[in-house]
Image (cartoon, rainbow, N blue to C red):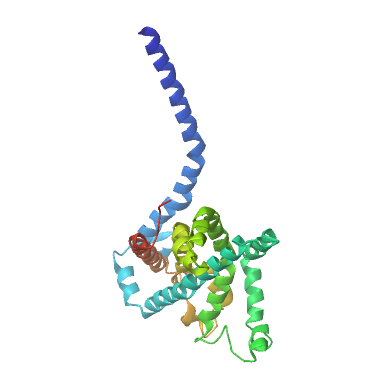
Amino acid sequence: MAEQKKAKTKMSAAAKREQNWGYLMIAPTIIGLIILNLWPFVQTIYTSFCEHLGFGQYKFVGLQNYIEMFQDPEVWRATWNTIYFCILTVPLGLFLALLVAMLLNAKIKGKGVFRTIFFLPMVCAPAAVTMVWRWIFNADYGILNQILGTKINWVTDPNVVMIACAIVAIWSNIGYDAILLLAGLQNISKSYYEAASIDGASKITQFFHITLPMVSPTLFVVMIMRLMSSIKVYDLIYMMVEDTNPALTSVQSLMYLFYRQSFVAGSRGMGSAIVIWTVLLIGIVTVIQFVGQKKWVNYEV
């Protein structure tokens, strides 16, 4: 009995040391999340209930910032612009990414080269990407107008500026999404397709009854990521549309409005309230997606 107790004591001591080492290994990540993510978010919540007096001084004003925010037509316009941007980019972007992933998954030569080409926009500097696209969209000597034979002001026309930004967003993200979807496609067993071919199923039937259901978990994750990214869009619009651009109000997102309120107008309380509203919007969209995914996402192996 004494030997068994000693053995248990040694095992518990070894397990405790291993546990402590585990805590030590994850400590940098946990500390970083608290300092860089959790604490700033808590400060943002507090600041949204305050008025910024300058020099780091704040005055508690309760719900005043939220009342003014929801009474401001510019906030509602930015909210609609953000939703409209998601509508333009997410469905079409996911469709094209899935199409590219299926092409890369086919038996073609040089698949590695094509994967690299499609992924290149993700490693390019956003400023460089924007400069190239602004040249493409230039109304006077842009290559797009020359190809189409038109004189469309892609970046300054309020009716088309959102479409121009959506094109850049889809082009920039399609490679990353395609790589993720390609990983999901490669996890599908070939035996399903062999059995379907023996039964006489066409390629279209195989896509809708095998490929789409089996890749739906990966597609769901990519959709959630792309929705969050689209709702938080800022840098693309900031670099594509200047402050003096007459089309700014037609493309201004919530995060761009947050930047203007916090760092241009100096109203950090209102800016923080806009951030909380954006977080709430992301939460609503995410909950809707998780509820809806029960109807179309297949987790069966």
Q: Nearer the viewer, residue 27 or 265?
A: 27
Q: Nearer the viewer, residue 101 or 292?
A: 101
Is residue 143 in view?
Answer: yes
Would residue 76 be found to the left or right of residue 226 on screen?
A: left
The N terminus: image quadrant: top left
Q: Nearer the viewer, residue 146 or 111?
A: 111
Q: How many marks?
A: 0
x 47%, y 61%: residue? 199
Q: Is residue 32 above or below residue 73?
A: above
Is residue 260 in view?
Answer: no
x 59%, y 71%: residue? 171
Would residue 27 be found to the left or right of residue 114 on screen?
A: left
Q: Position of residue 235 (x, y in %)?
A: 55, 69
Q: Position of residue 73 (x, y in %)?
A: 36, 80
Q: Is residue 79 above or below residue 232?
A: below
Q: Nearer the viewer, residue 85 or 193?
A: 193
Q: Position of residue 143 (x, y in %)?
A: 68, 83
x 47%, y 82%: residue? 250
Q: Is residue 99 above or below residue 57?
A: below
Which quadrant would residue 239 be assigned to in this image?
bottom right
Q: Position of residue 248 (x, y in %)?
A: 50, 81
**The furthest residue to the bottom:** 150
Which quadrant would residue 5 be assigned to in this image?
top left
